[in-house]
Image (spheres, rainbow, N blue to C red):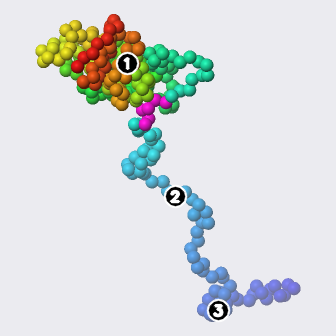
Amino acid sequence: MLAVMVLLVAAPFPSGDEGNGGLGAILPAEPLVGACDEREPHFAPASRERSKKELWLIEKARRPSVRTEEADLVPRHRGREVGKKALAPKLEAEARLAETMLPVGNRIQPIATLYNLWNREAMPLLAGRPYKRPFQLFLRDHYTKESTRSDTRLATVLAAAALKFHSPRVEVVSGYRSPKYNLMLRKKGHQVARESQHMQGTAVDFRVRGVTTEALGEFVRGLHVGGVGYYPRTHFIHADTAKVRYWTGG
């Protein structure tokens, strides 16, 4: 056995120049493809900086929709408890305006949206949200841009009309009038009182879209808040918080 091992060790290796029987027949052949890591396809791609447009599209997709449709302004009717007596229209409006504001994240439904025909401004009346100062600015004189401490009971009248006729929009024809503007209207022959309640910030002229002036006037008279003027030709109702009285104008 020792003799055979000696012979194997002493035997010379064939050279690479002897064809297929040389050294190339003993060593492994060259690989057909380059060596690669089998995990390479599973590696995460190298991060790159996003463009401004890509960042804007991502932010837009995550942005909540705040678009308000016309149907969203229609107040939803809340179910009343069985056997519970319904509140009077004025009291119901006061209760809705004094409700607790909904927590953040809930959809807020306006009680009504007021629209000033002169200033072309819209003001939503929201439950639980303070409205005194915004309402007084909303009723400011469009001619002199002056405002006064208008009676907030007028907002209750407007809200009650919106709830009664299930209307999402109340159009304000006239709010506060400065003495200068009131005098100018009198000189031009308009039917305005010398000591108009509009000058005191206690009157508002308004209409409700889709509601006849007659029906609106009858409803406002039933509130017994103050004076009510019926103007069928110009299609609006005057409401103030002075003493109760009724009249018909042009």
The spot of residue 217 in percent (x, y) is: 35, 19
The spot of residue 62 in percent (x, y) is: 47, 43
Amino acid, disc 1: Glu
Q: Nearer the viewer, mark 3 or mark 2?
A: 2
Q: Nearer the viewer, mark 2 or mark 1?
A: 1
Single out the residue that lies furthest toward the bottom.
18
The spot of residue 127 in percent (x, y) is: 46, 22
Amino acid, disc 2: Pro
Q: In the figure, is residue 185 to the left or right of 200?
A: left
- Residue 73 is inside the magenta segment: yes
Kindly tell me whether residue 148 is visible in this rendering: no
For the residue pair 153 and 210, the one nearer the viewer reads as 210
Q: Which residues are magenta?
A: 71-76
- Residue 123 is inside the magenta segment: no
Amino acid, disc 3: Asn
Residue sitting at 41 percent across and 50 percent down? 54
**Mark 2, residue position:** 45
Please, is residue 53 above or below residue 105 in the view? below
Kindly tell me whether residue 208 is visible in this rendering: yes
Please, is residue 91 above or below residue 171 in the view? above
Q: What SS does tag 1 mark?
A: helix
Q: Quadrant of residue 129?
A: top left
Q: What SS does tag 3 mark?
A: helix
Q: Which mark is residue 20?
A: 3
**Mark 1, residue position:** 218
